[in-house]
Amino acid sequence: MKRQRVKYFSPEEKRKLLDFIQKHYPDKLAQRSGFMYKLMFSTGLRLAETIHLNVGDLKDRSVLVVIGKGNKEREIPLSAAIREEIRQFLEQKRMSKEDVASDAPLFISRKRRRIGSRGVQHDLEKWVRLAGLEGRYSPHALRHTVGFDLIRGTNNIRKVQEFLGHRFITTTQIYTHITKDELRECAELLICDPVADYLVCSCN
C-alpha cells in the first residue's frame, strides 16, 4: 500500500514561521498566534485540545493535563522554555484587560470569544502565506512536526507514542518514515577505499 505523505514543518520552516510572526509583536493577534503555535510545537496538542484550553489549565503548571481522543486523559510535561512563554502570554492578557480567570478561554478571537477550529485554520494559512512558506499546512501539521522531531531526537517510538497519546503504536509509526534527503545523507556517510577494496558504512 502506498504510504500517504505526512505534511509537517521542517526545522527551518518552523523557525521561519515563528520568527515572522514575532516580527509583528506587540500586535495582540500576532502575540496570540505566536504563543499558540509555540505551545502546539512544544506539546503536540491536537487542534481541539488547544482551542478548549482555559487559563487555569496552564497557569503555574509544570504538567498540562488534557482529555484527548476517546475521552482519554494524558499528562504532557511543560519545558522550562514554554513555561516562560506561558507566563509572558498570561501577563500580556492581564495587561490588556482580558479575562485571566481560571475558567476563561486561553485563546480568544477578534470578537473576544473562544477561538474556533476554523479560525485557527484561517489564521495559520495567513501566517504561512505571509511568511513565504510553500504549500498548505493544516493545524495538525504542527502535531506531526512534534512527532517527527521526537522520533529523530529520541529514536524511541514508545516514548513518542506516550507523549502524543496514541492508542496504537501503528499510528506513531508514520514518524519513522525515511525521507529521500535522509537517504542521501546516509549515502554521504559511505566511505569507499578502492585500494583496500572494502566499504566502510557508518550509516545506521
Image (spheres, grey):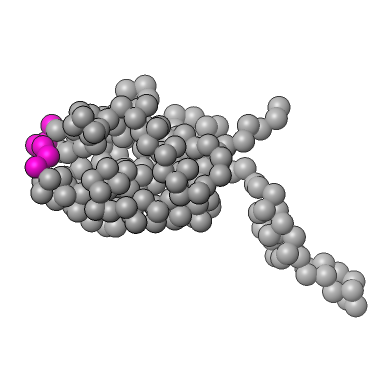
Q: Tell which of 90 and 71 is nearer to you.
A: 90
Tell me the residue at 29%/57% (across/down): 81
Tell me the residue at 50%/49% (across/down): 132
State whether residue 4 appears in this view: yes
Q: Tell which of 19 and 43 is nearer to you.
A: 19
Q: Is residue 11 above or below residue 65?
A: below
Quarter location, residue 199: bottom right
Q: Is residue 120 above or below residue 28?
A: above
Residue 45 percent across, percent down from the top left: 36, 37
Tell me the residue at 44%/29% (across/down): 167
> What stretch of residues is rendered in magenta?
97-103
Q: Main secondary structure of the magenta part?
A: loop
Tell me the residue at 14%/50% (across/down): 91
* Image quarter of the N terminus: top right
Residue 134 percent across, percent down from the top left: 56, 44
Q: Is residue 71 above or below residue 46?
A: above
Which residue is at the far top?
Answer: 70
Q: Is residue 51 above or below residue 61?
A: above
